Amino acid sequence: MLTADRMIAAGIMLMSLYFMWHAQELPIGWVGATGGPGGGAFPFWLSLVMFACAGGILVRSFRDTPANTGPFFDPETLSWIIAVIIALTTTVALMPWLGAYIALPLFLFWYLKIFGKHGWVLTLLLSLGTPVFLFFFFEVTLKILLPKGITQPLFVPLYAMFF
């Protein structure tokens, strides 16, 4: 378990360094007097926080005595992780065809209702509310278009309202 903690922490630190390196291709600081943060600001600072958190885990793994020295994953946990990885991979693969606004609610429905066995209210609230939030956050506020796939024609009236 301790070796796995150290390996994962080191891997996250390496990924964070890679992300920070690529984020510097865009401006990280403030752009203009009223322009706001540059395009690389969020990825850079998020990666820096990830690096610091993983560094804390790495330091703690050398300093503290481990509470659990058993296997990192038991077979049941490993099967759950594999199921979620398959579902996420399927979601990403479906995005070009179905679009983010169909693929993400399908994943959320599966994850919450079928995999997590949560109630209908929470499942429907998150499965239907998340795409609405993502539309307003990314497309209206940040002007970042998410993949639409077959739903592209449905967005023409919304674009006319907001752009």
Image: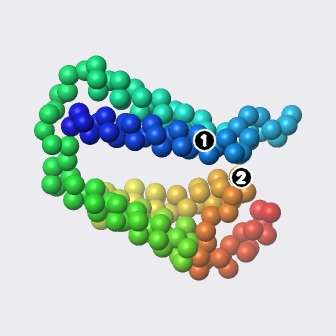
Q: Earlier in the sequence, mark 1 or mark 2?
A: 1
Residue visible at 41% across and 33% down in the picture: 54
Tell me which amino acid carries mark 1: Trp
Residue visible at 72% across and 69% down in the picture: 158
75 above or below 107? above
Q: Residues within 10 Å of mark 1 (few under 14, many from 20)?
A: some
Tell me which amino acid carries mark 2: Thr
Name the residue that disc number 2 marks.
141
Q: For residue 124, say whether it is visible.
A: no
Looking at the rendering, which quadrant does residue 120 occupy?
bottom left
37 sits to left or right of 46: right
Foreground mark, 1 or 2, reads 1
Pick the residue in front: 7 or 129. Answer: 7
Looking at this view, name the residue that lies furthest to the left: 70
Q: Quadrant of the N terminus?
A: top left
Pick the residue in front: 13 or 86. Answer: 13
Name the residue that disc number 1 marks.
21
Residue 114 circle label: none
Label 1 vs label 2: CA separation? 26 Å
CB contact under 8 Å: marks 1 and 2 = no
